[in-house]
Amino acid sequence: MANEIKAPADVAAPPQDAQRTESGLAYIMLKSNPSGDRITESDWVKIHYTGWTTDGVMFDTSRNGDEPAVFPIDQLIPGMSQALMLGRTGESLRVWIPEELAYKGVKGAPQGMLVFDFDILGKATPEKPSFEPVTGAIELHDGLFYEISQRGHGAETIRESEIVAIDFTGWHVQSGMLFHSSVQMGEPLIGQVKDLFPAFREVLVHAHEGDRVTIWVPQALGVDPGGRKLPGRLVFTVDIHEVRPAPQGIPAPDDVAAPPADAERTASGLASKVLAPGTGDRHPTATSRVRVHYTGWTTDGNMFDSSVVRGEPINFGLNQVIAGWTEGVQLMVEGEKRRLWIPEQLAYRGMPGMPAGMLVFDVELIAIL
């Protein structure tokens, strides 16, 4: 594995001086910071981490040159959640997580007791916006309001034809619960404005590169790109990182509308076809980090994203992407190119701002990191 970090000497079992919790966790504090903030169940954390199995094999790390990982505490495996809530910001700890608090034998995930080193760099908990339009918010129509809460550096308003890279977080107003976030997914949403969630599309043409925008969406307009209604009123915060002209798209393959008869199929509904073989026989696991080039189309032939067009491959953890990618990339070996037909239930499942329906991706697995 590239950038492999050597396992600690005590990886096989917790040492005698390790502290233990009632749930079965064992841990030692590597670096203490008594003045740091406690981590709570409702927090998101920014961390660096490395994980090993007890035989010393590293299966995942954030320390490979990328940005630190950001996770919501309540969506991690139980042992990771419990471990991070033992610490404070600025602290480092080593944790031995028994299998019943880890992946519980899930196929493709690391097995048995797992050992993690965590550096808790800080909290990244998104700030809740006002759930009602603030004084000065602009109403476009029918209860759709927006406010530019922070002006960026862009001089011109965004056009529908342009491509934006945005981070967004959305809450249900009635429950007060966060229901979706690109930050949680580990990468910004990139796409043409005209193809985004309708409320985003209508508001972003009034905003600029670098703006932070709050959008209040009435129930009647809570419709995803596939036309399905989302429950209740919604409020989003949107950070507009980049705006650029739409590049020349890569033409869709001839079989984009549906998988051909010779495609491989899995029990989940994923279909795939090898376009070019790779080398070796090592496959990534469900928790591996990988480097890939990819292009994605909807089944009507519309290209909605491409690292090839951007000219830069992307690194990510397979446990941080849609289920179809998690499953499909595990079928591949380094150097392989494969076409994936991902049914909607393994793709974005109607999430706002994301392409709807079955999606088709050409993926090149450049490296398992």
Image (spheres, helix red, strand yellow):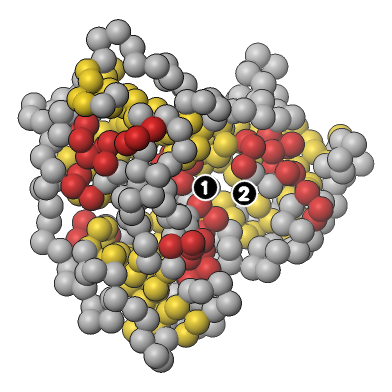
- Viewer can see residue 337: no
What is the quadrant of the N terminus in the image?
A: bottom right
Q: Dot 2 lies on which element?
A: strand
Q: Give the residue pinned by disc 2.
A: 50
Residue 203 drawn at (x, y percent): 22, 31
Q: Which of the numbered marks, if any, corresponds to residue 63? A: 1
Quarter of the rendering containing residue 226: bottom left
Along the line of sight, which residue is nearer the eye, 231 or 168? 231
Taking the image as shown, residue 68 lies to the left or right of residue 58, namely: left
Mark 1 or mark 2, which has the lower sequence index?
A: 2
Characterize the local packing of mark 1: few (<14), some (14-19) or many (20 or more) Cα atoms within 10 angstroms. some
Characterize the local packing of mark 2: few (<14), some (14-19) or many (20 or more) Cα atoms within 10 angstroms. many
Asked if the residue at tag 2 contacts the one at tag 1, i.e. Cβ–Cβ closer than 8 Å, the answer is: yes
Look at label 2 and name its amino acid.
Thr
- Viewer can see residue 286: yes
Question: Residue furthest toward the bottom?
Answer: 262
Q: Residue at the spot x=65%, y=26% of the render?
A: 39
Along the line of sight, which residue is nearer the eye, 46 or 29? 46
Relative to 333, residue 246 above or below: above
Residue 48 drawn at (x, y percent): 56, 40
Quarter of the rendering containing residue 302: bottom left
Q: Dot 1 lies on which element?
A: loop
Quarter of the rendering containing residue 213: top left
Along the line of sight, which residue is nearer the eye, 346 or 318? 346
Taking the image as shown, residue 65 lies to the left or right of residue 312, namely: right
Q: Residue at the spot x=46%, y=46% of the render?
A: 185
Taking the image as shown, residue 67 lies to the left or right of residue 11, namely: left
Residue 176 drawn at (x, y percent): 53, 25
Look at label 1 and name its amino acid.
Arg
